[in-house]
Image (cartoon, rainbow, N blue to C red):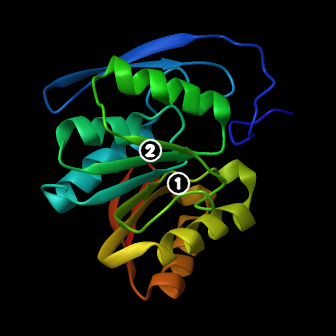
C-alpha cells in the first residue's frame, strides 16, 4: 500500500490546492495524492508553526523542516522571517516537486530543497529543527529521526516535534529526554503535544 513516506509514490495524480492566512499573510499550496495532508494544513503542523513562533518570538539562524512534505512549515516560516536560512528535506520525490512549485508560488526564494531519508543527505547543523514525524512509518523510523536531529543541533539549538498523545507522545518525550538531556511539553491542544528538546 502506498504511503506519503515512500520515496516514489505510485498513486495516480490528483492535484489540489488550498489557501491559508498566517500572521496577516496569505499562502497558497499545491498538493497531490501520495503526500501528507493534501487537502489542508493539518492541525498538528499549524499548531507546530504557531507554537514555535510564540516560543521564540523572532526566528533567526538556520532551520530544517524535516519531512517537509510539500513545504508548508518551512515556507510559512521563511516568509514570516526572511533572514532565516531554511532547508526543506523529505524522502518523497513527489512532495519535493510540489515544494519547489510552492516556494515559487509563495515567493519564498532562497530555500534549499533536499531529497533525503532523514538527515542522511542534509548538510550542516541547525539552530532549529521542526518535525511532524511519519507515525505510520513506525517507532523505529521516528526514533531514528529524533536521534539524527539531536546530533545536528547547534549549541543552544532546539528540536520541535508535534505528536498526538494517543500516538505515543509520552514515550516520545522520554526518548527525546534521553537523546538531548532535556525535553519538555510546551503546548497541548486537541490531543496534540508540542515537544521541545535541546
**Residue at the spot x=13%, y=27% of the render?**
24
Does residue 125 appear anywhere in the picture? Answer: yes
**Residue at the spot x=67%, y=54% of the render?**
117
Which of the labelled discs sits on residue 121, or is there none? none
In the image, taking residue 165 as reference, residue 80 lies left or right, namely left
Give percent across and percent down for residue 133.
57, 53
Give percent across and percent down for residue 176.
50, 77
Figure label count: 2
The foreground one among 87 and 180 is 87
In the figure, 127 relative to 130: above or below? below
**Residue at the spot x=49%, y=61% of the render?**
123
Sequence order check, earlier mark of 2 and 1 = 2
Q: Nearer the viewer, mark 2 or mark 1?
A: 2
**Quick one: label 2, few (<14), some, or many (20+) residues within 10 Å?**
some
The foreground one among 172 and 151 is 151
Quadrant for the C terminus in the image: bottom left
In the figure, 170 relative to 47: above or below? below
Residue identifier under label 2:
44
Q: Are marks 2 and 1 in contact (CB under 8 Å)?
A: yes
Does residue 37 appear anywhere in the picture? Answer: no
Residue identifier under label 1:
164
| Distance (Cα) linking label 2 and label 1 | 8 Å
**Quick one: label 1, few (<14), some, or many (20+) residues within 10 Å?**
some
Give percent across and percent down for residue 14.
66, 10
Which SS class for mark 2? helix
Quadrant for the N terminus in the image: top right
In the figure, 100 relative to 120: above or below? above
**Residue at the spot x=44%, y=66% of the render?**
124
The foreground one among 187 and 15 is 15
Amino acid at each position: 500500500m502506498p504511503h506519503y513516506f515512500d520515496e516514489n509514490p505510485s498513486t495516480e495524480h490528483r492535484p489540489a490546492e488550498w489557501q491559508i492566512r498566517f500572521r496577516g499573510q496569505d499562502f497558497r499550496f499545491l498538493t497531490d495524492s501520495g503526500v501528507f495532508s493534501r487537502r489542508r494544513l493539518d492541525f498538528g503542523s499549524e499548531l507546530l508553526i504557531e507554537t514555535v513562533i510564540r516560543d521564540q518570538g523572532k526566528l533567526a539562524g538556520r532551520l530544517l523542516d524535516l519531512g517537509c512534505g510539500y513545504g508548508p512549515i518551512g515556507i510559512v516560516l521563511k516568509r514570516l522571517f526572511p533572514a532565516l536560512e531554511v532547508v526543506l528535506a523529505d524522502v518523497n520525490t513527489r512532495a519535493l516537486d510540489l515544494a519547489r512549485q510552492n516556494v515559487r508560488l509563495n515567493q519564498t526564494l532562497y530555500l534549499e530543497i533536499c531529497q533525503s531519508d532523514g538527515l542522511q543527505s542534509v548538510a550542516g547543523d541547525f539552530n532549529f529543527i521542526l518535525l511532524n514525524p511519519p507515525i505510520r512509518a513506525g517507532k523505529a523510523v521516528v526514533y531514528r529521526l529524533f536521534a539524527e536531529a539531536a546530533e545536528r543541533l547547534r549549541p543552544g539549538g532546539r528540536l520541535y516535534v508535534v505528536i498526538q498523545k494517543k500516538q505515543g507522545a509520552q514515550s516520545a518525550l522520554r526518548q527525546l529526554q534521553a537523546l538531548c538531556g532535556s525535553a519538555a511539553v510546551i503546548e497541548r491542544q486537541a490531543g496534540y503535544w508540542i515537544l521541545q528538546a535541546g
